[in-house]
Amino acid sequence: MLDRAAVDALFPSDLPDPEHWEQQYPQRQLPEGAKVTRLGPSPTGFIHIGGIYAGMIDRDVAHHSGGVYLLRVEDTDRSREVEGAVEQFDRAFDHFGIHPDEADGRGAYGPYLQSQRAEIYWSYVRELMRDGKAYPCFATKDELDDITARQRAAKLPTGYYGRWATWREASDEDVAARLAAGEPYVVRFRSPAVPGERVKFTDAIRGELEHDANVNDTVILKSSDQDLRLPTYHFAHAVDDHLMRVNLVIRGDEWISSVPLHLQLFAALGFEQVEYAHIAPLMKQEGKSRRKLSKRKDPEAAVDFYVQAGYPADAVRYYLRGLANGRLAELPLEQALAEPIVLSECGVAGPLVDLVKLADISANLIATLSGEDIVTAVSAWAAVHDPELVGVLDTERAMALRALDVERVGVDNPRKDLRMWSDFRPAYGFFFTSVFALVDDPADERLGGLDPKLVSVFAADFAEGYQEFADQQEWFGQIRDLAARHGFAPNAKEFKKNPDAFPGSIREASQLIRVALTGSTQSPDLYAVARALGTDEVLRRVRALAQA
């Protein structure tokens, strides 16, 4: 074991002792039982919807206990960092309303980027080395690969442990010689466990768990030849959770196997042990089986998928809360958003992400909103994702409100054709003169194969005699009377009996006007559409077919 002077020579001479950091980051003054939670995303790519799920749980548990929720960016792997990822974190958390109480730029326990905390980590690494609980390791990649190959050949667990840990018991002379030669080294934690040892711990979600103790001498400080020497995640999270006074770590269940190592690190550092809660991953149905929602395979794994599509943030939050605690999915939205998430009610099997269910929730939410609220929300979404639509809504706001009233106001079962804000253009775009493309080809396939000459004449006659009746039946009577004059069957049944005797039924005649007004064979109530458009616009659209 290196003596204190030799250890200290490996670090800056003015490096503070751990006591300095303990005083700088004192215990928080919080109510008894308050939880301090954290989310630690890594800026190696876009944020997964699972990050929003975990952050939502973190924030909810902290706030309902009178505690604090903080965001700490775990960027120790600088080689894999993606430019703009940190900014995307901020946008995502802002969009879904799960703002952290502390994060980069605010809070007394920062910095909140691990890459800015190197000096803090060095203090604690040095302390472990002074106590003989960590040591320098000069093993090269080739040497480590050889160890792994021999372990596999012998059908032994792979890792740096026992007799394979070649630098664990190296002499001071050998270490000094390598240091003098300027050879790069990492610092490894000296595991106190022996093969076969077991460790028990209690998980806030899963109860008591038991695993093999960690016997590997894990790297805690990366290679000395790096420009910015940072710790590994395992060590950094232990130091940060302690100094930021985190007392509840909610994270994915892939970290359960690391708990034995983390418990060792906390004990070696003299830290009070935090409580762990390991949540099950979000899943996707694939055929008859389920798998984890994948960043690589599934577009819905990305937070931007929901933002770009324009799912209302409250709908997504409501849905995710229901995945965390099933009872919340049975409550009205406002109540579910206010009720606490209970860790003990989180399942240990991964909840299934069902976009159909989310769409239903979203459509139900939007159906409760006023036209003004919808236009405001669509405009805010479109400002980023459909700028042209913003101008349309600004100049034709009255039309937008009339359009949204169709089959939504004064009816028992309002339309639910908006599931997300990106649905607005395809569902309502035809109402706007600046968006709608006139149907001016009487042979257009949307007209169902009617004789083009008949289409033009029918449209001309409709325009010539058109009246904007206040009564729906009277208004539709115009189409019925005109259809009879042009030889259409009065109903589908009659047409089906003798199709050669008619060009179509009243249905085909109505579709002709529907396509002229909306550009589609499916639309809201045709009478309501015509009322919203107004007489001048109805005539302009129908005459486009008549003049063809």
Image (spheres, rainbow, N blue to C red):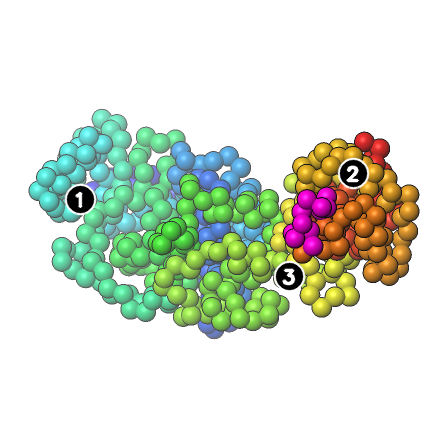
Circle 2 SS class: helix
Mark sitting on residue 158: 1
**Coordinates of residue 491 in the picture (x, y in percent):** 72, 55
Which residue, as the protein is rendered here, is positioned at the far left? 154
- The mark that comes first in sequence, 1 or 2, is 1
- Say which amino acid is labelled 2: Leu
Which residue, as the protein is rendered here, is positioned at the far top? 181
Residue at 91%, 43% (x, y): give it.
464
Circle 3 SS class: helix
| In the displayed structure image, the side of residue 483 where residue 57 appears, left or right | left
Q: Quadrant of residue 541?
A: top right
Tell me the chief SS of the magenta region: helix
Give the residue pinned by disc 3. 365
Compared to residue 222, the image places residue 263 above or below, namely: below
Give the residue pinned by disc 2. 454
- Say which amino acid is labelled 3: Leu
Residue at 19%, 44% (x, y): give it.
159
- Say which amino acid is labelled 1: Thr
Circle 1 SS class: loop
**Coordinates of residue 432 in the picture (x, y in percent):** 79, 43
Q: What stretch is highlighted in magenta?
A: 494-504
Residue at 67%, 56% (x, y): give it.
493
| In the displayed structure image, the side of residue 516 where residue 171 appears, left or right | left
C-beta proximity under 8 Å, tags 3 and 2? no
- The mark that comes first in sequence, 1 or 3, is 1
Residue 531 forms part of the magenta stretch: no
For label 3, count other residues whose C-alpha is less than 10 Å away and answer few (under 14), some (14-19) or many (20+). some
Residue 503 forms part of the magenta stretch: yes
